[in-house]
Image (cartoon, helix red, strand yellow):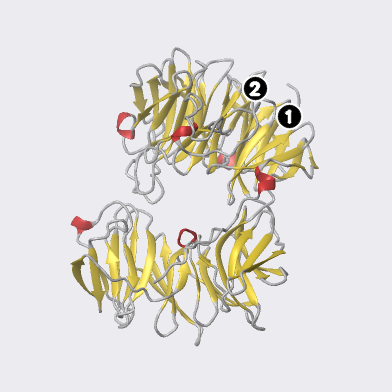
Amino acid sequence: MTKFNRAQKLITLSLLSIFLSLGAATPAISQDLGNGFFDYGVACSLSTDRGVVATIDGNGRNVILLWLFDHRGSYALLMIDAETGKSQTFPVPFPAGDAVYSSLLSGKNKFYTFFNKHFTEFDPVRRAFTFSAKATDQNAMAMTEDDHGVIWAVTYPNSSLVSFNPRTKDFKEYGYLYKQNWNQYPRSLAIDDAGWVYFGLGITASQIIAFNPVTGKVKPMLPESERKRGTASVYRDLDGKVYGLPLGDIKDDWYEFYKGDEHKIGKHHSVHSKPVITGGSGLLQSDFRDGKKIKTLDLLKRKLVVEDPKTNTQKEVSFDYDSEGAWVMGVASSPDGMIAGGTTFPVRFFIFNPKTRQFVNHEAFGQFDAMTSQGDHFFIGSYGGGCLLEWDPSRPWINTVGNEIYRPWRQPKESARANEQEVITNPLFLTGVNPVINRPHRLLPYPDGKTIIMSGTPGYGYTGGGLLFWDRDKKTQTVLPDSAIIPDQSTFSLLALPGGKFMGGTTTAPGTGGEKKGKEAELYIMDIADRHLDWHEVVLPGVQEYTDLCIGPKDGLVYGIADRKKIFVFDPLKRTLLYQQNIDSAFGTTPARESPRVFIIDPKGEIYLLFLHGIAHMEPGSFKITMLAKSPVPINVGGDYLDGRIYFVSGSHLCSYKPDDK
């Protein structure tokens, strides 16, 4: 199987425009929703692609097919005429949601994918979806076409296998072929010329599975001793056999597979993959049948450039597409009185000016999951890689580069060119601590004014995330693994306590694709100086996540949300639980996301809580929760208080609520 991915193609797929990278201001389309709520519009009016192929339509014209993704998930297929730029959006024939992780252009010029529990076929000749079937598992991680033109897919998270015969329209599900206690990522799929199916999976422990569709026989091919953290891979060779690696990055450990049998061959000197146009979310098949190529496909500027190597010419055309905007991960107030936030697919950073009601968009260094201010600087926890960034709002924006040489405390390096100096980016890349933290969940600006603490879940396939301590004065870091905190768990929420202490609330969730090992989440207290645990305990039996924590400005008690549905009050001095109550039946659940920011405290010390369908107030002392207002739009993530308003995110929109003065 041959995968056409961006990294393998010598072309430019420009997904970021210079115009937006420089931060052009765009006015928000604001709407008064009533009852104190306001909608400022879409923060980032863009979609991203989840697979691109160059092919022809029914008239033999060059066209581009690509799967579109915005805050709703993968929602449509876009078809662009490569000569004119005329485009058409085809909504998927089932509910939008989830994301395309694999797609395939068949030898018969049909475009396939499987996501959101649906398998689908699109025919560019008929300009229509021509088949769709609901399936059991979630989405395909790998696809292939066998020697008879049958389309196959293997799925996340349970390694289900499906097949589709385009001639007979027969869709088959073969069930879950391999049971594990963690979510499986089967990233490669191949079929030998005898009809045996093989797929490589990971991430917690690699494995290669062989399957006979005729008899239903399933065979794990790797002995337990060869199963390592990572992902196994397979491919179909022109000799009719399938070859595989227990880990994709170890190249001298090949297996040969045929008719369900395996032979370890060590080095494999001659790879001749059977051509199949398929790949993951980064699929890019750029070659048209007449020899022309996609050179640039820019979803920001909506520009397409096609080159003709025969005449050494290029043609640029404009195209358009429907979008409801990128998925906003969260927002926070910045030191200069703005609301700042990050989006994903595409990854962007936006700044909203409440006075002018304008958005400024910038290119982001990864997915900005957690944000906070300390002093006059703004800090960002970015996925992937567990990166910590520092933004100075008073300085011009210069796109981040993740490299040691861009640290500001270093002197500019001497250059071979006279007077040339090193560029200092803004935001500044401070550090990356993957795999200890890969997906940041919380940033805590400690009251000492110099320490930033970052927490989150670990790298792919790992269990248990640690803590990063960043010293702004010394420009140094200390990283604690989960073994020094709560083994096999990650810190999901953080809170500063008086007396040089801080509190953490854990989650039992592992890193993406990892194995869940923790039984119950815990609260802990740690000393900021020696970074040793003072105390930890399963305060609320059965809880899997401490969603958010805040300290009561008037009473010094810790208020918390657990599992998005339980409120509790804790005395950090006596280390005793004072109050707990399930609140989901009365108020619903609180927002989710990587860093949900459920508690909002105003300058007067009033405590507000964000729920999916409203905003509430909590009374210290009685611990009574009162719903202030039902929200006319879903509250997906918080949130911060600025100039009398509580800001939050609804899908791709930035919204706010103005509570009555207390």
Give residue 13's position: percent from left, percent from top. 57, 58
Give the number of callouts: 2
Is residue 118 visible in the rendered image? The answer is no
Circles 2 and 1, Cβ within 8 Å, touching? The answer is: yes
Residue nearest the observer in this picture, 28 or 652: 28
Give residue 187's position: percent from left, percent from top. 39, 62
Tag 1 residue: 659
Residue type (three-letter) at the residue carrying disc 1: Pro
The residue tagged with tag 2: helix, strand or loop? Answer: loop
Give residue 342's position: percent from left, percent from top. 60, 41
Tell me which label, 2 or 1, sits earlier in the chain: 2
Is residue 249 visible in the rendered image? The answer is yes
Q: Distance between the residues labelled 2 and 1?
A: 11 Å
Q: Residue 9, relative to residue 401: is it above or below?
A: below
Image point (38%, 21%), residue name: 526
Give residue 347's position: percent from left, percent from top. 58, 47
Decide: few, some or many residues near mark 1? Use Cα within 10 Å; few <14, some 14-19, many ≥20. some
Residue type (three-letter) at the residue carrying disc 2: Glu
Image point (73%, 26%), residue name: 644
Residue nearest the observer in this picture, 602 or 619: 602
Which numbered disc covers residue 606? Answer: 2
Image point (31%, 57%), residue name: 180
The residue tagged with tag 1: helix, strand or loop? Answer: loop
Q: Is residue 99 left or right of residue 462?
A: right
> Which quadrant is home to the N terminus?
bottom left
Q: Residue 345, relative to residue 492: is it above or below?
A: below
Residue nearest the observer in this picture, 215 or 563: 215
